[in-house]
Image (cartoon, rainbow, N blue to C red):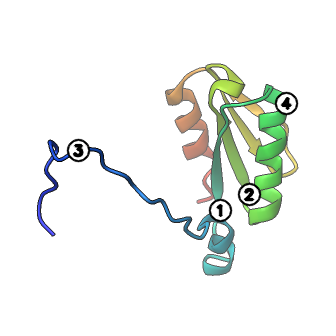
Amino acid sequence: GGKVDSRGGPLWAHLIPTPKILPQLREWFPRGWITGWKYEVDGLESDAVARGVAQMSGAGSDACVVNGPACGTDWIWLRQNQAAGRFESRAALLQALVDAVPR
């Protein structure tokens, strides 16, 4: 308890994996519109997109936004049974996400 002395020497963190929440969302919200996010550092853009598609399949989500160094500076929005969208700005991506939310 209390504050850790930053002059007390090296500190080590033990990271414990936690369950993924995204795959549970479909059960919790069966009629919800669920979008995942995939930040990819390694590989080609095609690899990142494939991992986004796999995430949608595994999680039962409706869409996935893929970004990170593997995608350059763009965001790629994948949706079930629709062509991928490419966005060069956060504002354009966010507007597309807002516009797609069923009302």
On the image, the x and y values in percent for residue 30 come to: 68, 77
The residues bearing labels 4 and 3 have C-alpha atoms spaced at a distance of 44 Å
What amino acid is labelled 4 in the image? Ser
Is disc 2 in contact with disc 4, using a CB cutoff of under 8 Å?
no
On the image, the x and y values in percent for residue 39 come to: 62, 39
User: Does label 4 or label 3 sit earlier along the sequence?
Assistant: 3
User: Does label 2 or label 4 sit earlier along the sequence?
Assistant: 4
The residues bearing labels 3 and 2 have C-alpha atoms spaced at a distance of 47 Å
Circle 3 residues within 10 Å: few <14, some 14–19, many ≥20: few
What amino acid is labelled 3 in the image? Gly
Q: Please tell me whether mark 4 sits on a helix, a strand or a loop.
A: helix
User: Does label 1 or label 3 sit earlier along the sequence?
Assistant: 3
Count of labels in the image:
4
Residue placed at 64% from the left, 53% from the top?
36
Q: Please tell me whether mark 3 sits on a helix, a strand or a loop.
A: loop
User: Does label 1 or label 2 sit earlier along the sequence?
Assistant: 1
- Of discs 2 and 4, which sits in the foreground? 4
Q: Please tell me whether mark 2 sits on a helix, a strand or a loop.
A: loop
Residue under label 4, please give it.
Answer: 46
The residues bearing labels 1 and 3 have C-alpha atoms spaced at a distance of 48 Å
- Of discs 1 and 3, which sits in the foreground? 3
Residue placed at 55% from the left, 23% from the top?
89
- Of discs 4 and 1, which sits in the foreground? 4
User: Does label 3 or label 2 sit earlier along the sequence?
Assistant: 3
- Give the label on residue 33, or none: 1
What amino acid is labelled 2 in the image? Asp
- Of discs 4 and 3, which sits in the foreground? 3
Circle 1 residues within 10 Å: few <14, some 14–19, many ≥20: some
Residue under label 2, please give it.
Answer: 62
